[in-house]
Amino acid sequence: EDLNKIRQAIMDSVGSVDGCVVLAESIPALRRLLFKDDKGGSQHMGSSSPTMATTIEAQNRFQYVFRTFVRAIVSPRRPLVLFLDDLQWADAASLDLIQVMVTDTQTQSLLFLGCYRDNEVSDSHIFSAAVRQIQGQKIPITNIHVDNISKEDVYNLILDNLNLDDPNEAHELANVVHRKTSGTPLFVIQFLLKLVDFGALQYSFRSKSWLVSSDAVKSCSVANNAVDLIIDKILRLPNEVKAALKLVACFGSHCDGSLLCLVATGVAGEIAAVTPGGTGGEGGRASDPELMRMLEFAVHEGLMDKVGSVFRFSHDQIQLAAYSLIPEAERGGWHLRIGT
């Protein structure tokens, strides 16, 4: 019943079938909601999009439709919190859409949270310009600077996750981890995982807690930065998993599994050569199940996440580390063979 009310509110607000088509093409998950028939099935959207005279006109139309869509789904009873990460990479069109949304005076129950790396954003950056334009319309903005985590934060992280019986042991481990990582969150997590890989941290099923070898922790070397630490982790993975990670890295932060299977033939030599059994399948290509198994292994190792059929690197630094394993002289060939 609530979904039907939301559906009707969206359609009333957008005001036309063409507007609903624009929304459904931009947000595919809305198709089942907006084009649902009375029997619960999906209606046909139509074979073509609304005709737009110019690119500017199309952009203005989309911004209008999106603004009215947000008005329809947001209310004091149903507030919306929207979080977007890595805004330092956002393009101009995306920033324009954000500006249209957050400056709409008719939307009162929206909280927008944006995260960006201030060391990658200068005053002349398009993101900085967008922020100034939003501020120019008297929209209140709260800036929160997120620094590296403190030694006490590392201690609490260890205490919460490792269930150590001895607080002094947790403090000693936190001191070493913080000293070696400077409190960089990704660095901290990867270094703790490295301690597990090297046996400095071992889980005891008997005591249901983690056991710490202080000497092993102190002697464990650490890379100069998180990327080098992740590279070290990837290099210790099976060869076929490394090849699969390099393949995904060529697409960027994420890629659909079905597309990966489709283009894997383009890098058959790299993947099939390290696939158990030699040829890896018909035509010298890793089979689809084998490729999926490699990626699932990467998910298990915490290097990737899987949402539906999409594999996504857990952090952009992990993608950078995997991509750096492809020699620079060979990268063009990889992209050429997979069509990116």
Image (cartoon, rainbow, N blue to C red):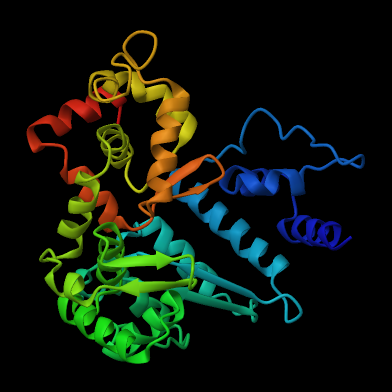
Q: Which of 158 and 270 is in front in this view?
A: 158
- Vertical side of 228 occupied by 178: above or below: below
Q: Judge from the rendering whether residue 178 lies leftward or rightward of residue 251; answer left or right.
A: left
Farthest residue to the front: give it.
206
Residue 338, percent from left and from top: 30, 26
Q: Nearer the viewer, residue 128 or 290?
A: 290
Farthest residue to the left: give it.
329
**The quadrant where residue 183 appears:** bottom left
- Vertical side of 179 occupied by 217: above or below: above
- Vertical side of 286 occupied by 331: above or below: below
Q: Quadrant of the C terminus?
A: top left
Residue 257, percent from left and from top: 47, 34
Taking the spot 30% from the left edge, 83% from the top edge, the residue there is 149
Q: Which of 26 and 306 is in front in this view?
A: 306
Farthest residue to the right: give it.
39
Taking the spot 39% from the left edge, 72% from the top edge, the residue there is 210
Residue 23, percent from left and from top: 63, 49
- Vertical side of 334 occupied by 40: above or below: below
**The quadrant where residue 193 appears:** bottom left
Number of disc labels: 0
Residue 254, percent from left and from top: 39, 45
**The quadrant where residue 229 appears:** bottom left
Taking the spot 19% from the left edge, 51% from the top edge, the residue there is 231
Taking the spot 37% from the left edge, 79% from the top edge, the residue there is 158
